[in-house]
Amino acid sequence: MTTFLKNNKICIEKINFDIAGKISLKLEDGRIIIVPLKYFTELKKLPVEKRKKYTIVDDRTILFSHVSKKDKTND
């Protein structure tokens, strides 16, 4: 099965921390992406209650109010 994402807008609906050591991103099209927290060192250090304090901007960017700016990735 081949899936093409060209011209498709990927929108984050919500995020969860229900799986220990992982962040789950639920997309508006129903897909769920699960990523280990080891890739987000500052986020991994936060208690679960502080991780729940986030804002989704432009359907694609997640901002956490308790994460310092120095932990941004440069992709």
Image (cartoon, rainbow, N blue to C red):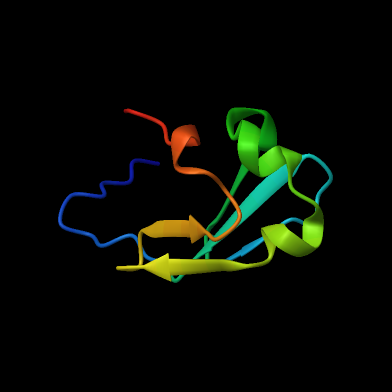
Q: Position of residue 62 (x, y in %)?
A: 46, 58
Examine the rendered structure and indicate whether residue 2 appears above or below residue 19.
above
**Front residue of this view, candidates 67 and 35:** 67
Quadrant holding the C terminus: top left
Can you name the residue that lies furthest to the left here? 7
Q: Residue at x 63, y 31 (%)?
A: 41
Q: How many marks?
A: 0
Q: Residue at x 67, y 37 (%)?
A: 37
Query: Does the rendering let one see residue 46?
Result: yes
Examine the rendered structure and indicate whether residue 40 appears above or below residue 20.
above
Q: Is residue 69 left or right of residue 45?
A: left
Q: Residue at x 55, y 61 (%)?
A: 65
Can you name the residue that lies furthest to the right here? 20
Examine the rendered structure and indicate whether residue 58 appears above or below residue 48.
below
Q: Is residue 37 left or right of residue 47?
A: left
**Front residue of this view, candidates 10 and 63:** 63
Quadrant holding the N terminus: top left
Q: Position of residue 57 (x, y in %)?
A: 36, 67
Q: Position of residue 46 (x, y in %)?
A: 74, 47
Q: Position of residue 64 (x, y in %)?
A: 54, 57
Query: Does the rendering let one see residue 12?
Result: no
Q: Is residue 12 left or right of residue 43?
A: left
